[in-house]
Image (spheres, helix red, strand yellow):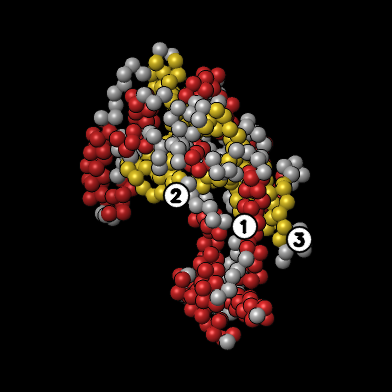
Amino acid sequence: MKVAIRPGDLKSDKPLIIDALLRFLTPLSDGRRFSWLYESNPYGRAHAWIAYSVDDGTVIGMSAAFPRRIYVDGHEEVSWVLGDFCINDAHRSLGPALMLQRVCLAEVDSGAVAFCYDFPSTGMMAVYKRLHIDPSQRMVRLAKPLRVDRRMKAVTKIPMVNRALSSAGNVLLRLSNRELRGDCGLEIAFYQGGCGAEFSDLAAQIGSCYGICTRRSAEYLNWRYVDNPLYRYELFTARRRGALLGYAVFLQDGEDAMLVDLFGAEEESVLCALIAHGVGVMTKRGVQTVSATLVETHPWRTILERQGFKIRETSPMVIYFPSSGGQIMSQQSWLFMQGDRDT
Amino acid sequence: MSETIETQIRKFITERFPSARGGNLGSQDGLLESGIVDSLGVLDLVSFIEESFAITVTDEELLPENFQTIERLTKFVEGKRNGLKASY
């Protein structure tokens, strides 16, 4: 079977793209997801490429790129975060995947964007290996246990012992979390509704002071978190005398929660108070563990570690630049977290 | 010769990929669709046949028809080796 790649047209190929993603990638693929992710991004519509059989036109896979505006060294660059890469099981011989990825990277080489980045799965790393592209950074998941009930269930099946151990463990964890409290005149509050101009102002004010980071404009935050049809995010703000100093975005999924975004002036007390508040809310809800996935060299990683977050697994992050100047960028601090992924 | 190539490929697959170990892996059993060999596995498989049979596999040859069964893989390696011989 001869395979070819063509650019996807978001209008005419919409049903085909939704169907390919549903069959090869995620059960969450539907019209709402497509409309949000591909058509409504304030930084531009997505780009898609479709791999198909030349013999009968059957779609065998696809990939996509989602525009992002990134602050780099005090200025703004347009980039892509790559995602929605999928191939029919029967065609996972690397060839079609390589063809798809080459077409996408060729667009970057031609200057479509300054650079692109990807958070590849193990399988996708095979494609990058074959293309001689190494991970530029690693993402690390940090986790903070809030309760021990789940872990104790695995330790013993005797309900009474289980309850006793869990109670004792939970008390110890609560005591160790008490030191997270402490305020400094900050007002931490749950934020409801759409983000306004103050969020854009904060993003512009901070820019790339602490490293390369996504421009978190109000429009971007509203699209990425507030209007996201797939997940219900919760945003907490930190203010002093009413002025926005920072915010944290959490996502709860059953007994687990994630700190997906943390942003603000690098005043440790602000970031600590935001983390502590979110952790406190999740503790009250009975959440077992809060995780935070961020770039290994993230400047605020130590703040999380001081708050009791421990290192868990790591995963690769690939940054692809069309020019050699990119080498310098890949060595800089990246203020990237879970929220900087495609979905 | 063909049996030797097939035997070597079969031995590598059963040793390298845990899901190939259970039953008798047939020459025409699907390797990709069944999930016995994934993308990373294909890379391993390519490295193995390149080293073991002194051939080079191009990206264009990384197609399902060459990798979907042990039989196809054997024919592909034989074809590459014959091509090499013919070019001398």
Of all chains, the one bearing label 3 is A
Q: Is residue A190 visible?
A: no
Residue A315, label in figure: 2
> Which residue occupies 62% across, 32% down?
A43
Judge left or right: residue A169 versus residue A97.
left
- The CA span between labels 2 and 1 is 21 Å
Binning the other alpha carbons within 10 Å of mark 2 as few (below 14), some (14 to 19) or many (20 upward) gives some
Residue A28, given in percent of the width and then of the height, sits at 59, 46
Residue B29, given in percent of the width and then of the height, sits at 59, 75
Q: Secondary structure at mark 2?
A: strand
Look at mark 3 in the image and give the residue it sits on: A54
> Which residue occupies 36% across, 42% down?
A143
State which quarter of the image contains the C terminus of chain A. top right
Of all chains, the one bearing label 2 is A
Q: Is residue A205 above or below residue A332?
A: above
Mark nearer the N terminus (3 vs 1): 3
> Which residue occupies 63% across, 30% down?
A42
Q: Is residue B66 above or below residue A151?
A: below
Q: Is residue A12 visible?
A: yes
A329 or B9, nearer to the observer: A329
Q: Amino acid at mark 1?
A: Leu
Labels 2 and 3 positioned on one and the same chain: yes
Mark nearer the N terminus (2 vs 3): 3
